[in-house]
Image (tube, rainbow, N blue to C red):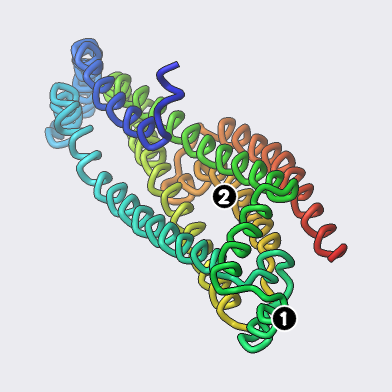
Amino acid sequence: MVLLSLSFDSLHGILRRLYDEMTELCQPMMTLATAIAALGALFYIAYRVWQSLSRAEPVDVFGMLRPFCLGICILFFDVIVLGSLNGILSPVVQGTGAMLHDQTFDVRKFQEEKDRLLSEMPLKVAVTGEFNPTDEELEKEIADMGWSEEDYTVMQRMSHTCYSFSLQSIVQTIMRKVMEFLFRAASLVVDTIRTFFLIVLSVLGPIAFAISVFDGFQGTLVQWLARYISVYLWLPISDLLGVMLARIQTLVLQSEMEMIRDPLSVFSPDGSTAIYLVFMLIGLVGYFCVPTVANWVVQAGGMGAYNRNMNNTASKAANVGGAVAGASTGNVAGVLLKK
């Protein structure tokens, strides 16, 4: 399949292009909404004029401008309404996206530095992962074994390669890849649902504006605006979650590199993998809490059922991910206890 050859970043870009193309479908709805709004404006103005005449009061012309303002918004819905909202909210998305890009770059940089330090670790540390001998002890051991510097370098690389192909390392790598896939899949699920909601709100937005002209349905306009802004904020909130997790991972990598450089500290690659799996689990659950957080920023009613479903999904994902991370952590702890 073609989709399998695409990266997750490419799929996010496809969703953004899909939204831009689908919003053009609001043109037919604008024509229908104009007719509905005209009918609503007729009843709206006639009722107030008749009410003022029956009470022998002057007609309040300013109060009758509301249907005309809504009619103008419907006629130029894609420019006035969608253009204004997207123009105001898009800098928020771009800002959080830039923050996520910078933090991800830092994580990759520190991960490469950590891998370099691990490849340069002494042979004994690469095999046992328990302690760092001093330079004098290491030179004495090499001299006693009759190794040259070239022999030691070759054995060091061989030991690191053997550990990477061990059963324990393979299991940890599989767990790590599975959690990374679930983490990226959760992000894609949230972005896909967000795009679907935005398309529905954009295409049917003129109808919502037209219905809000009628008496008793004025709250429809406020609810539509609140829901559109709330759903639009899903992406920047998920980016902020990614920024937080990337920053935590950066701090963990910096701490691990300090432990590797310190000859008196004890560093275990197994514990590092377990910590990484735990934070991936936290991020997986956090992605399904994004709609709830967005609802805190802008209160939008009528989405309680969906939020409950998302929370239930997050709980199930937490149980599955917790079992995976627990099994991996238990295996790591068992190996460390044996050592």
Residue extending furthest bottom? 136
Q: Which of 205 and 289 is in front in this view?
A: 289
Q: Is residue 177 left or right of residue 8?
A: right
x, y percent for residue 182? 58, 38
Crowd rating for badge 1 (residues with CA inside 10 Å; few <14, some 14–19, many 20+): few
Q: Which of 63 and 99 is in front in this view?
A: 99
x, y percent for residue 17? 27, 27
Q: How many labels does the image show?
A: 2
x, y percent for residue 172? 68, 48
| Residue that numbered label 1 is attached to | 144
Q: Which residue is drawn at the image coordinates 48% and 45% (left, top)?
A: 295
Q: In which quarter of the image is residue 66?
A: top left
Q: Is residue 229 left or right of residue 116?
A: left
Image quarter where the C terminus lies is bottom right
| Relative to 251, residue 262 above or below | below
x, y percent for residue 337? 86, 64
| Residue that numbered label 2 is attached to | 283
Q: In which quarter of the image is residue 152?
A: bottom right
Q: Which mark is residue 277?
A: none
| In this view, the mark in front (1 or 2) | 1
Q: What element carries label 1?
A: helix
| Relative to 145, residue 32 above or below | above
Q: Which residue is drawn at the image coordinates 29% and 54% (left, top)?
A: 95
Q: Which residue is drawn at the image coordinates 37% and 26% (left, top)?
A: 217
Question: Which label's residue is closer to the chain start, 1 or 2?
Answer: 1
Q: What element carries label 2?
A: helix
Look at label 1 and name its amino acid. Asp
**Whole-Å distance between the Cαs marked 1 and 2?**
49 Å
Q: Which residue is drawn at the image coordinates 48% and 37% (left, top)?
A: 301
Image quarter where the N terminus lies is top left
Look at label 2 and name its amino acid. Gly
Q: Is residue 92 left or right of residue 231?
A: left
